[in-house]
Amino acid sequence: MLQGKHIVLGITGSIAAYKACLIIRQLVKRGAEVQVVITPAGKEFITPITLSALTQKPVISDFFAQRDGTWHSHVALGLWADAMLIAPCTASTLGKMANGVADNMLITTYLSMKAPVFIAPAMDLDMYQHPTTQQNMQRLLSFGNHIIEPGSGFLASGLDGKGRMEEPERIVEVLNAFFDNAPAAPTAHTDDMKGKRVLITAGPTYEKLDPVRFLGNYSSGKMGFALAEECARRGADVTLVAGPVTLACSPAIKRIDVESCEEMYQAATRCFADSDAAILCAAVADYRPAHVAQTKMKREGDELILHLQPTRDIAAALGQMKRPAQRLVGFALETNDEETNAQKKLEKKRLDFIVLNSMRNAGTCFRNDDNQITIIDAHGATPFDKKPKADVARDIVDRLVSIL
């Protein structure tokens, strides 16, 4: 419920700034008290007097009030708020938030915020897809922030609408649902993996058909990258073997880029020998073409028959290599008989526990930034609620730490 909640609404220099009026109306209608903090660029798109009329509060833009020089305390705002919502949030502001560039009142308020922070990005598709923007968003997620986009509660799927700010009604619904569910605060920074060496695989593999075509899957790599960031945040020495994705990772993470299953197999088996644990999150192809054409295959006849052969089983190979002190975590994506299939994989590949994803859970798995998992080990199954992948990573790493 939003009744009586204190919401700091940050507005940045986007054409979508006019939608902030609709957000304010929805929040106030539900009983929330709203304080607007706007960037200088934001005032180019919407006037503070309009916002003030809706909130019944002076709009904060500068560190000092222009009329009497009163200091606007970003620290006080951080303590006052029950939540901070930045909508619209430009690529520039995303970058400043991710890297602590405190050059305006909005960013200093964000850095002082004690309450949950929700971010509704607004930019064109090219800016959204740029690796820098993706890296900034992943960093913000790893800090415990929530990112709201069209198509789902937190971080949507697919490219339709990507970059466009979510509609005001939906944004307010997400905040309302958050307070209804009253989730626990993100886990504080710890060093419980300090000194541990962790191998993580992430993303898809591409198996070539010819110089321009391949067999692949829809994996974005975001779950694996979130796991890598979480392990690094907790002090681990992380090696990330990444399939072909557009994501970036923190400089502290040692990244090895691969394309095919064979390349991922070689990198993973080489790195696992010196690792304390491995989390196999990649969506690895089970089959590859028996023959790869050296030139582009031409369209001839009514059908094309492909002969496929099995790829190397990375999880099984590491399971055979595993020493008693090492820990091995696998993933299983299932469409039916989920727990039964995952249990078989757990036992067959000598995993310490397995993370089950189900395609039946709408808004999770491939091309989504939320996930809903069940962790299965020798003692049984533990289901978790649907949540952002950064929070899912925290749950998985908590379980890994408990057995290291």
Image (cartoon, rainbow, N blue to C red):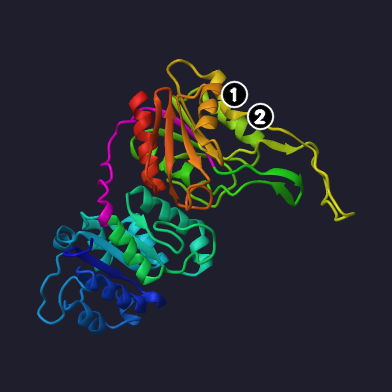
x, y percentage for residue 173?
33, 64
Which disc number belongs to residue 317?
Answer: 1
Quadrant location, the C terminus: top left
Asked if disc 1 and disc 2 are in contact, CB closer than 8 Å, the reply is yes
x, y percentage for residue 390?
39, 46
Say if residue 76 shows up in the picture. yes
x, y percentage for residue 392?
39, 43
Query: Callout 1: 10 Å neighbours few (<14), some, many (20+)?
Result: some
Q: Amino acid at mark 1?
A: Ala
175 above or below 321?
below
102 left or right of 271 in image: left
Q: Amino acid at mark 2?
A: Arg
How would you classify the magenta stretch by its main secondary structure? Answer: loop
294 left or right of 153 in image: right
Which disc number belongs to residue 82?
Answer: none
Magenta part of the chain? 179-202
Residue 305 lies in the magenta stretch: no
- Residue at horizontal 34 percent and vertical 34 percent from the top: 398
x, y percentage for residue 126?
53, 66
373 above or below 343?
below
378 above or below 134?
above
Query: Callout 2: 10 Å neighbours few (<14), some, many (20+)?
Result: some
Instruction: For mark 1, give the secondary structure.
Output: helix
Furthest toward the front, the residue is 337
Which disc number belongs to residue 312?
Answer: 2
- Residue at horizontal 82 percent and vertical 52 percent from the top: 296
Of 43 and 372, nearer the camera is 372
Of 370 and 189, nearer the camera is 370
Snapshot quadrant of residue 353: top left
Q: For the residues marked 1 and 2, what is the alpha-carbon distance in whole angstroms?
A: 8 Å
Snapshot quadrant of residue 95: bottom left
Residue 186 lies in the magenta stretch: yes
